[in-house]
Amino acid sequence: GTPTYLYQRTAPEVLSQLDPVPDVIFVFRNPSERADSHFRYFKDTKARIARGVSFRQFVTLALEEDPVLTKMTTEGASRIIANSRYADYVPLWFERFPRDRLHFLLFEDMTRDQRSFVRGIAERVGLRADFFETYEFKKWNESFRIKHPRVHGIRRELGRHLPAGVRDRLKSATAPAYARLTAETGRPRRTEDEPDDIGELDEYFEPLNERLAELTDLDLTAWRERRASPA
Protein backbone atom coordinates (compact mmCIF):
# COMPACT_ATOMS: atom_id res chain seq x y z
CA GLY A 1 0.00 0.00 0.00
CA THR A 2 0.96 3.64 -0.40
CA PRO A 3 2.25 5.31 2.78
CA THR A 4 -0.03 8.23 3.59
CA TYR A 5 2.89 10.44 4.52
CA LEU A 6 3.46 10.94 0.79
CA TYR A 7 0.59 13.42 0.93
CA GLN A 8 1.53 15.21 4.15
CA ARG A 9 3.92 18.02 4.99
CA THR A 10 5.26 16.42 8.16
CA ALA A 11 7.28 13.68 6.47
CA PRO A 12 9.37 15.87 4.14
CA GLU A 13 9.89 18.38 6.95
CA VAL A 14 11.18 15.74 9.39
CA LEU A 15 13.06 13.47 6.98
CA SER A 16 14.91 16.35 5.34
CA GLN A 17 16.43 17.22 8.73
CA LEU A 18 18.13 13.84 9.09
CA ASP A 19 21.89 13.61 8.72
CA PRO A 20 22.73 12.34 6.22
CA VAL A 21 19.74 13.35 4.15
CA PRO A 22 18.02 10.12 3.05
CA ASP A 23 17.16 9.05 -0.47
CA VAL A 24 13.41 8.99 -1.08
CA ILE A 25 12.01 6.68 -3.74
CA PHE A 26 8.63 7.30 -5.36
CA VAL A 27 6.98 4.60 -7.46
CA PHE A 28 3.99 5.98 -9.38
CA ARG A 29 1.27 3.83 -10.92
CA ASN A 30 -1.03 4.90 -13.74
CA PRO A 31 -3.73 6.75 -11.73
CA SER A 32 -6.68 5.23 -13.57
CA GLU A 33 -5.36 1.71 -13.14
CA ARG A 34 -4.63 2.46 -9.51
CA ALA A 35 -8.25 3.52 -8.97
CA ASP A 36 -9.48 0.41 -10.77
CA SER A 37 -7.21 -1.74 -8.62
CA HIS A 38 -8.65 -0.21 -5.45
CA PHE A 39 -12.15 -0.78 -6.73
CA ARG A 40 -11.41 -4.41 -7.53
CA TYR A 41 -9.71 -5.01 -4.20
CA PHE A 42 -12.63 -3.77 -2.12
CA LYS A 43 -15.28 -5.26 -4.37
CA ASP A 44 -13.76 -8.65 -5.21
CA THR A 45 -11.14 -9.43 -2.59
CA LYS A 46 -12.65 -7.76 0.49
CA ALA A 47 -16.29 -8.01 -0.68
CA ARG A 48 -17.06 -4.68 1.01
CA ILE A 49 -18.47 -2.94 -2.06
CA ALA A 50 -21.81 -4.36 -3.16
CA ARG A 51 -21.79 -6.25 -6.45
CA GLY A 52 -24.28 -3.77 -7.89
CA VAL A 53 -21.94 -0.78 -7.44
CA SER A 54 -20.19 0.08 -10.72
CA PHE A 55 -16.72 1.49 -11.26
CA ARG A 56 -18.30 4.74 -12.46
CA GLN A 57 -20.26 5.02 -9.20
CA PHE A 58 -17.10 4.28 -7.22
CA VAL A 59 -15.21 7.04 -9.05
CA THR A 60 -18.06 9.52 -8.54
CA LEU A 61 -18.07 8.83 -4.80
CA ALA A 62 -14.27 9.09 -4.67
CA LEU A 63 -14.22 12.40 -6.54
CA GLU A 64 -16.63 13.77 -3.95
CA GLU A 65 -14.79 12.00 -1.10
CA ASP A 66 -18.23 10.84 -0.05
CA PRO A 67 -18.41 9.41 3.51
CA VAL A 68 -20.49 6.56 2.11
CA LEU A 69 -17.39 5.27 0.31
CA THR A 70 -15.30 5.55 3.47
CA LYS A 71 -17.81 3.35 5.29
CA MET A 72 -17.63 0.75 2.53
CA THR A 73 -13.85 0.80 2.25
CA THR A 74 -11.32 2.95 4.14
CA GLU A 75 -10.48 6.63 4.31
CA GLY A 76 -7.51 5.99 2.00
CA ALA A 77 -9.68 4.33 -0.61
CA SER A 78 -12.22 7.15 -0.51
CA ARG A 79 -9.37 9.54 -1.38
CA ILE A 80 -7.99 7.39 -4.19
CA ILE A 81 -8.64 10.04 -6.85
CA ALA A 82 -7.27 12.93 -4.80
CA ASN A 83 -4.23 10.88 -3.76
CA SER A 84 -3.50 9.93 -7.37
CA ARG A 85 -3.04 13.56 -8.36
CA TYR A 86 0.67 13.00 -7.83
CA ALA A 87 1.75 16.37 -9.20
CA ASP A 88 -0.09 18.07 -6.33
CA TYR A 89 2.22 16.45 -3.77
CA VAL A 90 5.65 16.24 -5.38
CA PRO A 91 6.37 19.97 -4.88
CA LEU A 92 6.14 19.46 -1.11
CA TRP A 93 9.20 17.24 -1.37
CA PHE A 94 11.07 19.56 -3.74
CA GLU A 95 10.71 22.30 -1.13
CA ARG A 96 12.69 20.29 1.41
CA PHE A 97 15.01 17.89 -0.41
CA PRO A 98 17.95 18.24 -2.79
CA ARG A 99 16.81 17.08 -6.23
CA ASP A 100 19.40 14.29 -6.33
CA ARG A 101 17.87 12.68 -3.23
CA LEU A 102 14.45 12.23 -4.85
CA HIS A 103 14.05 9.29 -7.22
CA PHE A 104 10.93 8.97 -9.38
CA LEU A 105 10.07 5.60 -10.91
CA LEU A 106 7.12 3.82 -12.50
CA PHE A 107 5.16 0.86 -11.18
CA GLU A 108 4.83 -0.41 -14.75
CA ASP A 109 8.62 -0.68 -15.08
CA MET A 110 8.73 -2.64 -11.82
CA THR A 111 6.14 -5.17 -12.94
CA ARG A 112 7.73 -5.56 -16.37
CA ASP A 113 11.23 -6.42 -15.12
CA GLN A 114 11.61 -6.66 -11.34
CA ARG A 115 15.30 -7.55 -11.40
CA SER A 116 16.35 -4.65 -13.57
CA PHE A 117 14.11 -2.33 -11.58
CA VAL A 118 15.62 -3.09 -8.16
CA ARG A 119 19.14 -3.18 -9.60
CA GLY A 120 18.55 0.31 -10.91
CA ILE A 121 17.39 1.51 -7.50
CA ALA A 122 20.42 -0.07 -5.82
CA GLU A 123 22.76 1.70 -8.23
CA ARG A 124 21.02 5.03 -7.62
CA VAL A 125 21.35 4.87 -3.83
CA GLY A 126 24.75 3.21 -3.57
CA LEU A 127 23.78 -0.35 -2.64
CA ARG A 128 25.16 -3.58 -4.09
CA ALA A 129 23.25 -4.16 -7.30
CA ASP A 130 24.75 -7.63 -7.80
CA PHE A 131 22.81 -8.88 -4.76
CA PHE A 132 19.72 -9.04 -6.94
CA GLU A 133 21.31 -11.11 -9.72
CA THR A 134 20.19 -14.36 -8.06
CA TYR A 135 17.49 -13.00 -5.79
CA GLU A 136 14.24 -14.99 -5.96
CA PHE A 137 11.26 -12.70 -6.44
CA LYS A 138 8.24 -14.39 -4.93
CA LYS A 139 4.65 -13.58 -5.77
CA TRP A 140 2.89 -12.20 -2.72
CA ASN A 141 -0.63 -11.01 -2.03
CA GLU A 142 -2.19 -12.37 -5.21
CA SER A 143 -5.60 -10.90 -5.93
CA PHE A 144 -8.67 -13.09 -5.71
CA ARG A 145 -12.44 -12.79 -5.85
CA ILE A 146 -14.84 -13.76 -3.07
CA LYS A 147 -17.47 -16.03 -4.62
CA HIS A 148 -19.98 -15.68 -1.79
CA PRO A 149 -19.99 -12.08 -0.50
CA ARG A 150 -22.87 -12.68 1.92
CA VAL A 151 -21.08 -15.58 3.61
CA HIS A 152 -17.93 -13.49 3.77
CA GLY A 153 -19.86 -10.62 5.35
CA ILE A 154 -21.32 -12.92 8.03
CA ARG A 155 -17.86 -14.27 8.82
CA ARG A 156 -16.49 -10.74 9.12
CA GLU A 157 -19.35 -9.65 11.36
CA LEU A 158 -18.91 -12.66 13.66
CA GLY A 159 -15.21 -11.88 13.89
CA ARG A 160 -15.98 -8.43 15.27
CA HIS A 161 -17.57 -10.03 18.34
CA LEU A 162 -14.58 -12.21 19.19
CA PRO A 163 -11.55 -11.17 21.27
CA ALA A 164 -8.75 -10.03 18.96
CA GLY A 165 -6.41 -12.88 19.91
CA VAL A 166 -9.08 -15.53 19.39
CA ARG A 167 -10.16 -13.97 16.10
CA ASP A 168 -6.60 -13.86 14.76
CA ARG A 169 -5.85 -17.48 15.71
CA LEU A 170 -9.13 -18.70 14.25
CA LYS A 171 -8.56 -16.73 11.07
CA SER A 172 -5.05 -18.15 10.61
CA ALA A 173 -6.19 -21.72 11.29
CA THR A 174 -9.11 -21.61 8.86
CA ALA A 175 -7.66 -19.34 6.15
CA PRO A 176 -6.44 -22.08 3.72
CA ALA A 177 -9.70 -24.05 3.81
CA TYR A 178 -11.80 -20.88 3.68
CA ALA A 179 -9.88 -19.62 0.64
CA ARG A 180 -10.42 -22.91 -1.21
CA LEU A 181 -14.15 -22.75 -0.57
CA THR A 182 -14.87 -19.09 -1.17
CA ALA A 183 -12.11 -17.53 -3.29
CA GLU A 184 -11.24 -17.74 -6.96
CA THR A 185 -8.31 -16.27 -8.86
CA GLY A 186 -8.10 -15.11 -12.44
CA ARG A 187 -8.84 -11.99 -14.40
CA PRO A 188 -11.41 -9.63 -12.83
CA ARG A 189 -14.92 -9.68 -14.19
CA ARG A 190 -15.63 -6.36 -15.86
CA THR A 191 -18.81 -4.90 -17.28
CA GLU A 192 -18.98 -3.70 -20.88
CA ASP A 193 -18.96 -0.07 -19.70
CA GLU A 194 -15.81 -0.24 -17.59
CA PRO A 195 -13.23 0.31 -20.37
CA ASP A 196 -15.07 3.51 -21.35
CA ASP A 197 -15.30 4.59 -17.71
CA ILE A 198 -11.56 4.05 -17.24
CA GLY A 199 -10.98 6.00 -20.46
CA GLU A 200 -12.91 8.96 -19.06
CA LEU A 201 -10.80 8.81 -15.92
CA ASP A 202 -7.69 8.83 -18.12
CA GLU A 203 -8.90 12.11 -19.63
CA TYR A 204 -9.40 13.57 -16.15
CA PHE A 205 -5.83 12.68 -15.17
CA GLU A 206 -4.15 13.60 -18.47
CA PRO A 207 -3.22 17.23 -17.62
CA LEU A 208 -2.15 16.17 -14.13
CA ASN A 209 0.08 13.45 -15.56
CA GLU A 210 1.62 15.92 -18.00
CA ARG A 211 2.47 18.17 -15.08
CA LEU A 212 3.99 15.20 -13.23
CA ALA A 213 6.21 14.46 -16.24
CA GLU A 214 7.37 18.07 -16.32
CA LEU A 215 8.19 18.07 -12.60
CA THR A 216 10.00 14.75 -12.47
CA ASP A 217 11.33 14.21 -16.02
CA LEU A 218 9.52 10.88 -16.07
CA ASP A 219 8.74 9.29 -19.41
CA LEU A 220 5.03 8.47 -19.19
CA THR A 221 4.82 6.90 -22.63
CA ALA A 222 3.59 3.63 -21.11
CA TRP A 223 0.61 5.42 -19.59
CA ARG A 224 -0.26 7.18 -22.84
CA GLU A 225 0.15 3.99 -24.89
CA ARG A 226 -2.17 2.10 -22.57
CA ARG A 227 -4.76 4.81 -23.03
CA ALA A 228 -4.42 4.70 -26.82
CA SER A 229 -4.61 0.90 -27.05
CA PRO A 230 -8.02 -0.72 -27.62
CA ALA A 231 -9.72 -2.31 -24.62
Image: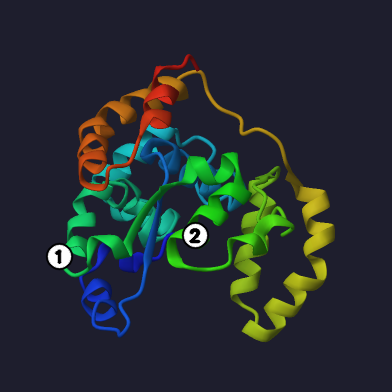
In the rendered view, would you say 85 is above or below 200? below
- The reply to whether residue 140 is visible in this rendering is no
Residue 218, percent across and down?
A: 32, 41
Residue, x 37% and y 35% (percent of image)? 57
Residue 123's disc number: 2
Say above or below: 88 vs 230: below
Q: Is residue 32 visible?
A: yes
The type of colouring in the image is rainbow
Pick the front one: 48 or 109: 109
- Which element carries disc 1, helix, strand or loop? loop
Residue type (three-letter) at the residue carrying disc 1: Glu
Q: Nearer the viewer, residue 133 or 197?
A: 133
Q: How many marks?
A: 2
Do the residues under discs 2 and 1 have CB atoms within 8 angstroms? no
Pointer 2: residues within 10 angstroms few (<14), some, or many (20+)?
Answer: few
What is the secondary structure assignment of the residue under circle 2? Answer: helix
What numbered label is drawn on residue 95? 1
Quadrant housing residue 178: bottom right
Q: Residue at x 82, y 60 (%)?
A: 176
Q: Residue 136: x and y, percent? A: 74, 57
Which of label 2 and label 1 is nearer to you? 2
Vertical side of 158 occupied by 55: above or below: above
Q: Which label's residue is closer to the chain start, 2 or 1?
A: 1
Say which amino acid is labelled 2.
Glu
The residue carrying pointer 1 sits among few (fewer than 14), some (14 to 19) or many (20 or more) residues within 10 Å by Cα, namely few
92 horizontally vs 147: left or right: left
